[in-house]
Image (tube, rainbow, N blue to C red):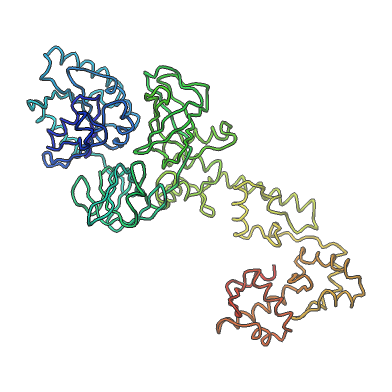
């Protein structure tokens, strides 16, 4: 279990850790000189058989950014209040931050009780109860302590050990994420990063990436709670020895990640909660400091539903940052007002990315309202009712495995098309729209061989996916870029029928004549004849393999089968194909280049291999 100590400056957090562990967490020379904590301090102890880690955070308001970096959602809070001072500004602000970051367990240490009388202790206890009212510390134990005399430490140790046995179950299946708070080198080992594992697990030998650069890193060794380990999992404080990166490539604010989930974001939507004592309503476009785990960015707060949010109020907002953050849906952020230099509020990330247009449009509001619950199953269904959901993108946004998202979607009765999940009703509507459009087109234009993709589906992603599914199932056919009902046959215009009748016999050969020869035989002017011949491929009557030559589809398939027979003995040359078909060299080259263009064959130097089925060559 990891314990975060929070509270006002000089209320004794560092002294409590030293009494519990024997470690002075003020390691910096400036901390020693000034007698106050500036940066994060870490210490560990075995307490009644339980391994407990302590994070000592700065209490001074100037170092709030360091305080936030030391807090993670699964930690246990130890709020320290000095009996002589009582509740102070950072007592209140630290508790607000703990709440905003989602901590749910903790207790209060009423320190320095040896310096005051019993009446003062009673008064400060009342202050602490008032402070904790309505928070996760409302009914938490308040333990009287004295670091000088040792008063209360036996009780504190008992409470911590009991809490350690009740640590919530740890999530194992999610991709690994660790928020880095320190990076340094150890002679003989190399680069070591430390931080709290926010999800998943990592083991020696795993390959991860740095979020800031995408640089690959391999796990060479692990320490968990300051002890050698083979694996670090959710909630652990871990020190990870990395291979493949230099110490100047990584630092506080970076993340160590599963490669599949790296996705830097400069904007996201969040459910904002404004703290009760913020001195003014929060306005649109407010300048804020954005704190996410150990990361920090400057940003702007964009309101969605109103011109302002009152103290104690909540709202869905967009947050735009000047530098990327590595947020995921469900993560917690803290926002501090840049002008007032105090905590404004914070909240839970509900969606990634901020659209440049129609940010406040009805479609966006509908999307966010369905994501606001934070439930992945409900959110997936909500999105799949209105738009296709890319399973890989959803998994990355929610820091989940693709297989887990697929299982979740299946359980919710969604259907998958080309890696996208859609509600059955959405598919049915799109299918009806496609079928109706095709039917109307065929009735209005019986001589047409079909509709273009743009005319039939436009830019609608649902229609495009459903159309591809209908083609795969054989309900709709596609040829020459035109889509048609599989049962539809275009009515052949009289002029096209007469033209085909005049050339069919001459084209019925494995070496049909060129357009010029056909025009001469028919005594037709070449230019208008060449234009008329272009109608034959539109009706599937002939295939234009080059600017000057047409083939009947059946004859091309004969040649394709010859290529398949040659390919069975290995790659073949132009000469071998010419000898096997009896076709002249110039025509053979036209045919083989047509095969290459259709993806039926692949040329490698002077040889070719068959790489696909022959059906495409006659389309």
Q: Is residue 207 above or below residue 328?
A: below
- Left or right, 236 with respect to 334, comes to left
Q: How many marks?
A: 0
Q: Is 84 situated left or right of 318 in this image?
A: left
**Residue under the point 49% across and 47% down:** 414
* x then y, percent, for residue 485: 69, 57
Residue 46, given in percent of the width and then of the height, sits at: 13, 41
The C terminus sits in image quarter: bottom right
Q: Nearer the viewer, residue 55 or 143?
A: 55
In which quarter of the view is residue 92 placed?
Answer: top left
Say which residue appears at 48% left-offset and 49% top-offset: 391
Above or below, 27 relative to 414: above
Q: Residue at x 34, y 38 (%)?
A: 294
Residue 79 appearing in the image: yes
Nearer to me, 447 or 126? 126
Q: Position of residue 418 (x, y in %)?
A: 54, 55
**Residue at the top extreme of this rendering:** 119
Residue 395 visible in rendering: no
Relative vertical location of residue 393 with respect to residue 146 in this rendering, above or below: below
Quarter in which the N terminus is drawn: top left
Percent of width and height locating residue 398: 42, 43
In the foreground, 324 or 555: 324
In this view, 150 is above or below 456: above
Q: Residue sitting at 62 percent across and 69 percent down?
A: 599
* Residue farthest left in this picture: 149
């Amino acid at each position: 279990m990891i314990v975060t100590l929070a509270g006002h400056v000089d209320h004794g957090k560092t002294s409590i850790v030293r009494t519990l562990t024997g470690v002075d967490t003020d390691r910096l020379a400036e901390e020693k000189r000034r007698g106050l904590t500036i940066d994060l301090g870490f210490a560990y102890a075995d307490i009644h058989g339980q391994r407990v880690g302590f994070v000592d955070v700065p209490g001074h308001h100037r170092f709030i950014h360091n305080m936030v970096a030391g807090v993670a959602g699964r930690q246990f809070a130890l709020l320290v209040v000095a009996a002589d001072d009582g509740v102070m500004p950072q007592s209140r602000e630290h508790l607000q931050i703990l709440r905003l970051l989602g901590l749910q367990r903790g207790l209060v240490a009423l320190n320095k009780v040896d310096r005051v009388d019993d009446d003062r202790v009673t008064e400060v206890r009342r202050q602490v109860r008032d402070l904790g009212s309505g928070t996760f510390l409302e009914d938490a134990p308040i333990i009287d302590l004295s670091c000088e005399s040792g008063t209360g430490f036996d009780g504190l140790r008992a409470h911590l050990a009991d809490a350690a046995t009740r640590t919530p179950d740890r999530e194992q299946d999610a991709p690994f994420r660790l928020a880095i708070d320190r990076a340094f080198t150890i002679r003989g080992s190399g680069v070591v990063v430390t931080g709290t594992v926010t999800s998943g697990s990592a083991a020696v030998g795993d390959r991860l990436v740095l979020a800031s650069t995408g640089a690959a890193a391999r796990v060479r060794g692990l320490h968990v709670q300051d002890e050698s380990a083979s694996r670090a999992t959710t909630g652990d404080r871990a020190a990870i020895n990395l291979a493949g990166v230099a110490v100047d490539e990584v630092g506080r604010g970076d993340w160590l990640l599963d490669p599949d989930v790296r996705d830097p974001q400069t904007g996201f939507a969040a459910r904002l909660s404004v703290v009760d004592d913020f001195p003014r309503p929060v306005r649109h476009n407010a300048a804020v400091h954005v704190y996410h785990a150990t990361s920090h960015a400057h940003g702007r707060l964009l309101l969605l539903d109103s011109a302002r949010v009152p103290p104690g109020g909540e709202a869905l907002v967009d947050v735009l940052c000047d530098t990327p953050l590595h947020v995921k849906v469900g993560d917690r952020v803290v926002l501090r007002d840049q002008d007032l230099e105090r905590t404004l509020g914070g909240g839970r990330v509900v969606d990634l990315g901020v659209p440049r247009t129609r940010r406040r449009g009805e479609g966006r509001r509908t999307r966010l309202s369905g994501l606001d619950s934070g439930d992945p199953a409900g959110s997936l269904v909500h999105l799949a009712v209105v738009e296709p959901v890319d399973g890989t993108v959803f998994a990355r946004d929610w820091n989940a495995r693709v297989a887990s998202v697929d299982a979740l979607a299946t359980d919710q009765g969604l259907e998958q098309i080309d890696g996208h999940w859609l509600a059955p009703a959405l598919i049915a509507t799109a299918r009806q729209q496609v079928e109706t459009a095709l039917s109307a087109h065929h009735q209005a234009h019986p001589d047409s061989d079909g509709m273009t993709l743009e005319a039939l589906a436009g830019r609608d992603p649902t229609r495009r996916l459903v159309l591809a599914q209908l083609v795969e199932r054989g309900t709709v056919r596609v040829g020459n870029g035109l889509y048609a009902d599989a049962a539809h046959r275009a009515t052949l215009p009289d002029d096209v029928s007469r033209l085909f009748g005049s050339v069919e016999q001459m084209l019925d050969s494995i070496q049909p004549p060129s357009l010029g020869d056909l025009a001469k035989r028919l005594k037709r002017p070449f230019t208008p004849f060449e234009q008329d011949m272009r109608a034959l491929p539109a009706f599937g009557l002939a295939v234009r393999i080059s600017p000057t030559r047409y083939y009947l589809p059946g004859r091309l398939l004969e040649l394709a089968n010859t290529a398949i027979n040659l390919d069975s003995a290995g790659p073949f040359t132009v000469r071998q194909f010419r000898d096997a078909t009896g076709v002249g060299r110039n025509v053979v080259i036209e045919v083989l280049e047509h095969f290459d263009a259709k993806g039926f064959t692949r040329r490698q130097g002077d040889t070719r291999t068959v790489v696909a089925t022959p059906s495409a060559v006659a389309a």
